[in-house]
Amino acid sequence: MRHGRACVRCYAPEQSPRAPHGAARAESEAITVRLFPRFIVAALALISVAAPAFADFPGRVGLRAGVNLSAFTGEFGDLVEPDSRVAANVAFVYEYDFVPKLSLHTGVGYSGKGGVSHSQGTDPIGNPTGTSKDTWSFNYLEVPLLMRARTPSLGRATFFGELGPVLGFRLSGKFETDSPSVGDVSLTTRMNTLDLGFGAGAGVEFPAGPGRLGLEARYTRGFDDLYDVSGTLATVNQAWTFALAYTR
């Protein structure tokens, strides 16, 4: 949108993102972001191989993989009006039944959030120079603590709904643009270590071998500004997640 680049200065570090130490930090964060989803996938593969060892473990364990469609909101979101950033959502999940149709649904995994905007650039005298793409990437280690309620089975299908708090632990944050006049900016140190919010979702499960195969949709939203910076417009995470899960 028109305002995207003008407002990002509210969140940019004081030093130039092109400074040598800034470049090193950005490269380190980029490596972390690239490797973390691969680490999660490898860990989930290992868990799936070791699943028989969990046969006597109370509750159920499993894997969840899907995509986030995330466009931040809040005062800054109202100004920028971002489109959705598409990012991965992968996790190890755990369920414990309190009663047959009510359980705690939790886990730990990677969740990519943020937003995408398109800005109209100008030269020093105000002439338009074209449209550029701006991307805010906020990456989290996410831990949902949801109560999941199931309906009686309808044939082979069982429907469920879920609601509860969601904890997002900061991994990294970055602003990227393809404009030659504005450099990429690390936002990690300006983000809160913990982003507390809520999640609400629904889905359907089917028997699959010794476990359950589920299709689910979940909406998550932060309660407050994701930045630990005073005097700026609030930026609040929100995302829709569409995922496939298997538990046993």
Image: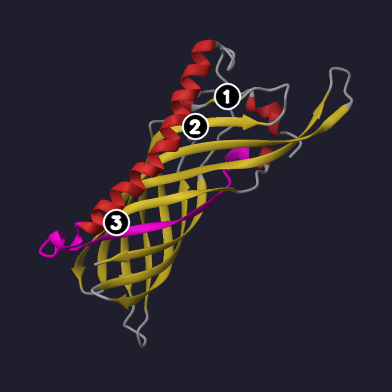
Measured from the top left, where is residue 196 in percent x and y? 39, 42
Query: Can you give x and y, in whole percent of width and height, for residue 134 in the image?
Result: 66, 35
Residue at numbered disc 1: 185
* Picture disc at residue 93: 3
The stretch of residues the image draws in magenta is: 50-77
- Which residue lies at the image location 50% right of the left edge and 43% below the top edge? 113
Residue drawn at the location 53% of the way across and 30% of the way down:
174
Name the disc covering residue 225, or none: none
Q: Amino acid at mark 3?
A: Val
Q: Is residue 53 magenta?
A: yes
Q: Residue furthest left?
A: 56
N-terminal-most mark, 3 or 2:
3
The type of residue carrying mark 2 is: Gly
Q: Residue 148's x, y, as percent?
A: 32, 65
Q: Residue furthest bottom?
A: 155
Specify the quadrant that holds the C terminus: bottom left
